[in-house]
Image: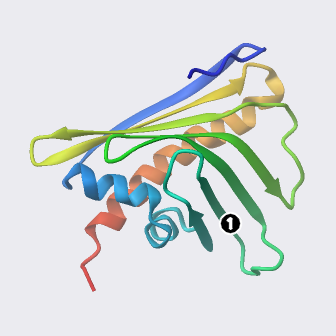
Amino acid sequence: MKHEFEYPTRSHTLSMTLPAVPEKVFALLITPSAIRGWWSAARAIVQPQTGGLWAAAWGEREDDPDYVCVATIRDFDPPHRLVLDDYRYFAKSGPLPFDADFTTEFRVEPAGTGAILTVNQEGFPTDAAADEFYRACEKGWHDTFAAIRRFLDLPSE
């Protein structure tokens, strides 16, 4: 099911090839300890199923986080596709200065002995009030992909 936004939107799409099988790449997206590793989250909770929960929090104090992101897993098709929607955000700095209905789709496709990870995040309003957040998310996805690369290069314990 595709979201039908009531306002003009824009999106980010980014892909990278990784030297890991699709199952390992997909596991990075749904395993809380991996999410903490590549996204620098203090905590993560995932109920890996359609209708499940995907949540992460940042900040030193568990009882008073700086930032929390919670989404519903709309589509769960391991190791190929994960779609998050119905986002809820909390930030100590306050709410977003605009209304938005974000959807994030992760696709994992085999590529030789590795996999291609693609993320598409849509629902960013074209209104100027969303410009700074849109640019920050674009930088954030590039930083996140670099962090995933670093996470995969870590020696196993």
What amino acid type should be assigned to the residue bearing mark 1?
Ala
> In this rendering, is residue 16 above or below 89?
above
Looking at the picture, tell me which residue is in the foreground, 41 or 110.
110
Residue at left offset 88%, top offset 37%: 97
Q: Secondary structure at mark 1?
A: strand
Question: Is residue 121 toward the left or the right of residue 115 in the image?
Answer: right
Picture quarter with the N terminus = top right
Percent of width and height locating residue 17 = 25, 43
Pointer 1 residue: 57
Question: Is residue 61 toward the left or the right of residue 145 in the image?
Answer: right
Percent of width and height locating residue 151 = 36, 66
Residue at left offset 50%, top offset 68%: 32
Question: Is residue 114 toward the left or the right of residue 52 in the image?
Answer: left
Residue at left offset 84%, top offset 31%: 99
Picture quarter with the C terminus = bottom left
Looking at the picture, tell me which residue is in the foreground, 123 or 30.
30
**Within-10-Å neighbours for mark 1: few <14, some 14–19, many 20+:** many
